[in-house]
Image (cartoon, rainbow, N blue to C red):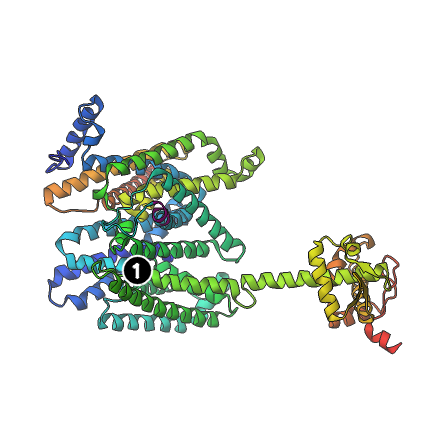
């Protein structure tokens, strides 16, 4: 397909130089969208996932709903499998191992149905069966997830796909993934910009939002749908579990740095993108310098962890300095 | 919490596997890999626990966010390390992948011995500290006032939890281990109110789901391999075990005696049915004991569909409380007695409310409407004696005599 990947053999710093020059070429139109090489697709996809998830992550952290997001990131597997099963013709006949490619409509259906199903089942168990919330979340998502894993193994007749779903495989990303991720990104950015005020009020004061006439439950379900859409967009790149790291990590770091919602959203997006880009760069660096192939998604998460530790340390230093002064 | 700890054990497993490979080369790998994997899992789980506590304490990060972050971060680190060994030590990579969803088929004797020993250890610890753990679980302050070391108990609980997770991850997998912590306990809670029985039942359910999950996964794998010989399919054990546990859990939630949802709903429905039956009889008694009623006449007093009412009249005539002529109904002698008894209970309760609890006479009716269906014969006797067998209620309506008195007359 490509004559040569220009990133082959580049180390961490020259990666950025090549990347910048390639972006320049892309902007001036010397290379088309179809000429993007795998490193660039990885950068764009991961950044898209990182922006979406860090935006949503802020609200999840502030609303104390991260556990529900955790559940959702698992249950979407079932949604993906079912939608895939119903939408793809000749599923059983094809000998080619599937890559779980999804069209945008089917992805939306899957995320919508799974978002609503998970939230509804959890609330049902909590209210009608009298379980504690964490227990009902735990039961709902583990059972749906194991159903998903069994089905995916049976249907694709590929034992490794289960592993890939959890771990993600950034190297297998293609241009279609980029399209899916950008659709999710646009959806999230538009919805959050459009409902910024509504989300803010429902997050901090659900009583006030009721008095003003928007229903907190509606925005709850909307947010959950967005979360599941993001998880579906991201699972091919980083796997269902590390999407969660992208959601909680940047927003927790941003929360440590500021008390304003807008600043927090900005910081969080910035940190997300930063870790995505440097993650890909590190991955390339290790491959060319030491000849080691790491999971790119894993490296992105590691970068987030390092950033988090650094923030905690700096904050501690500042606190200490304040006390001394 | 189990969720976070089980995910966090993954890097430990990888690390343990790696260290054992680096230290020992390729010699006694099959013995040391499981042991080192376990030690590593234990260590990183505890480390994750410490991190979560630190984040909560020092930075006032909410526990759920802290847990989510730690579990996904640790898992991500684990994945990175796993991908590192993917190409250099393929056999080891296979080993570490087994820990994701669990795979019982590749277990060996060393696993049985190890996990058996650990399980016995966990059970002994629970038995040893049973009383302390009980006090501590239900009432921390009480435990503290007894002079128990609450912090130490906290630590013990978490160590036990971590040990249980370490035992489970080889067969259930890190991703789904938390289900095994929750589902059997939730199911067991449905059957008993006592901690010791809950422990026993929960253990039993755990054993059952482990057993059947394993059998199912092995059988299914064999079946599939016969069906598609070239694909080398293997159904992971973990999801199978979890499915079995969840099915048991859901069945218990729905059908457990006393606490099951369906059972509870049925009980509520039966109570409603009895209330309605008694209300119908009561209204027939009040309008006219000797009169014949069509179903439409009654429907005016009761807010239910005439279809349901028809069913109720069918049941009533079967049981001999009403008699039927054409499409009209009338109370039998037995029916009159029973209706009078219901009215008696109603008015007795009104007297009790007005005289003893000082409730205004105009507000006693609503409560009595409910209590008339609930008061037992013993309670009726008590009320009669307490109120000195009153003859009129607060609204100056006569109270029908009790069945015993009537028999004496």
Mark 1 lies on a secondary structure that is: loop
Q: Is residue B281 visible?
A: yes
The residue sitting at the top extreme is: A28
Q: Position of residue A268 (x, y in %)?
A: 34, 36
- Tally of marks: 1
Question: For the magenta stretch, what is the residue range?
Answer: A82-87
Q: Work out whether A33 lies above or below A147.
A: above
Judging depth in this view, the residue of A169 and A275 nearest the camera is: A169
The residue that disc 1 covers is B173
Q: Residue at x 20, y 21 (%)?
A: A28
Q: Quadrant of the C terminus of chain B?
A: bottom right
Q: x%, y% of residue A149?
A: 33, 55
Looking at the rendered image, the quarter that the N terminus of chain B falls into is bottom left
Question: Callout 1 environment at 10 Å: few (<14), some (14 to 19), or many (20+)?
Answer: many
Asked if residue B374 shows in the view, the reply is no
**Place of residue A80 in the rendered image (x, y in percent of width and height, measured from the top left):** 35, 47
Percent across and percent down for residue B274 are 70, 63
* Residue plotted at (26% across, 34% down): A44
Magenta stretch encompasses residue B308 = no
Q: Is residue A83 magenta?
A: yes
């Amino acid at each position: 397909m490509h004559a040569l990947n220009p990133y082959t053999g580049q180390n961490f710093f020259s990666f950025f130089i090549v990347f910048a020059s390639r972006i320049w070429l892309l902007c001036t139109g010397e290379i088309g969208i179809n000429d993007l090489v795998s490193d660039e697709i990885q950068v764009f996809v991961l950044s898209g996932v990182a922006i979406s998830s860090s935006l949503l992550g802020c609200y999840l952290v502030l609303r104390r709903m991260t556990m529900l997001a955790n559940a959702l990131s698992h249950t979407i597997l079932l949604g993906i499998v079912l939608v895939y099963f119903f939408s793809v013709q000749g599923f059983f006949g094809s000998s080619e191992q599937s890559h779980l490619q999804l069209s945008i409509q089917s992805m939306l259906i899957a995320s919508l149905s799974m978002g609503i199903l998970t939230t509804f089942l959890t609330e049902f168990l909590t209210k009608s069966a009298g379980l504690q919330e964490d227990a009902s979340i735990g039961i709902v998502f583990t059972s749906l997830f194991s159903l998903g894993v069994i089905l995916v193994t049976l249907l694709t007749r590929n034992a490794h796909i289960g592993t890939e779903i959890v771990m993600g495989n950034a190297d297998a990303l293609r241009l279609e993934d980029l399209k899916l991720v950008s659709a999710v990104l646009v959806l999230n950015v538009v919805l959050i910009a459009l409902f910024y005020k509504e989300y803010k009020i429902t997050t901090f004061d659900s009583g006030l939002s009721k008095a003003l006439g928007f229903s907190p439950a509606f925005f709850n379900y909307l947010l959950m749908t967005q979360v599941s859409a993001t998880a579906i967009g991201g699972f091919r790149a980083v796997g269902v579990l590390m999407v969660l790291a992208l959601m909680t990590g940047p927003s927790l770091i941003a929360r440590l740095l500021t008390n304003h919602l807008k600043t927090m959203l900005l910081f969080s997006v910035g940190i997300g993108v930063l870790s995505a880009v440097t993650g890909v760069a590190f991955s390339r660096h290790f491959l060319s310098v030491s000849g080691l192939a790491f999971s790119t998604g894993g490296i992105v998460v590691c970068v987030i962890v390092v950033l988090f530790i650094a923030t905690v340390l700096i904050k501690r230093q500042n606190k200490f300095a304040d006390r001394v002064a | 919490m189990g969720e976070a700890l089980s995910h966090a054990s993954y890097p430990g497993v990888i690390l343990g596997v790696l260290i054992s490979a680096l230290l020992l080369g390729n010699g006694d790998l099959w013995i040391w890999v499981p042991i080192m994997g376990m030690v590593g899992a234990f260590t990183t789980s505890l480390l994750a626990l410490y991190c979560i506590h630190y984040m909560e304490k020092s930075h006032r990060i909410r526990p759920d966010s802290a847990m989510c972050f730690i579990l996904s971060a640790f898992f991500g680190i684990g994945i990175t390390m796993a991908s590192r060994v993917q190409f250099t030590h393929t056999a080891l990579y296979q080993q570490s992948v087994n820990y994701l969803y669990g795979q019982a088929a590749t277990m060996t004797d060393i696993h049985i011995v190890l996990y058996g020993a650990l399980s016995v250890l966990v059970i002994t610890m629970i038995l040893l500290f049973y009383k302390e753990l009980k006090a501590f679980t239900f009432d921390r302050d009480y435990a503290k006032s007894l002079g128990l070391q609450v912090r130490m108990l906290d630590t013990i609980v978490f160590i036990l939890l971590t040990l249980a997770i370490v035992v489970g991850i080889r067969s259930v997998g890190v991703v789904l281990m938390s289900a095994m912590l929750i589902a059997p306990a939730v199911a067991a809670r449905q059957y008993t109110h006592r901690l010791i029985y809950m422990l026993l039942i929960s253990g039993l359910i755990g054993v059952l789901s482990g057993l059947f999950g394993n059998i199912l996964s092995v059988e299914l794998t064999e079946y599939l391999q016969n069906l598609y010989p070239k694909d080398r399919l293997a159904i992971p054990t973990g999801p199978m075990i979890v499915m079995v546990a969840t099915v048991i859990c859901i069945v218990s939630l729905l059908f457990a005696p006393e606490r099951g949802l369906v059972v509870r709903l049925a009980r509520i429905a039966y109570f409603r049915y009895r209330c309605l039956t008694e209300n119908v009889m009561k209204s027939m008694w009040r309008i006219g004991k000797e009169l014949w009623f069509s179903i439409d006449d009654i429907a005016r007093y009761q807010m239910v569909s005439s279809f349901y009412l028809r069913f109720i009249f069918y049941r009533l005539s079967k049981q001999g409380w009403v008699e039927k002529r054409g499409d009209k109904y009338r109370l039998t002698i037995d029916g009159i007695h029973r209706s009078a008894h219901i009215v008696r209970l109603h008015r007795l309760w009104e007297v009790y409310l007005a005289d003893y609890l000082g409730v205004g006479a105009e507000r006693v009716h609503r409560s009595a409407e409910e209590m008339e269906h609930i008061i037992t014969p013993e309670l009726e006797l008590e009320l009669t004696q307490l109120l000195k067998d009153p003859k009129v209620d607060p609204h100056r309506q006569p109270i029908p005599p009790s069945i015993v008195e009537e028999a004496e007359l």
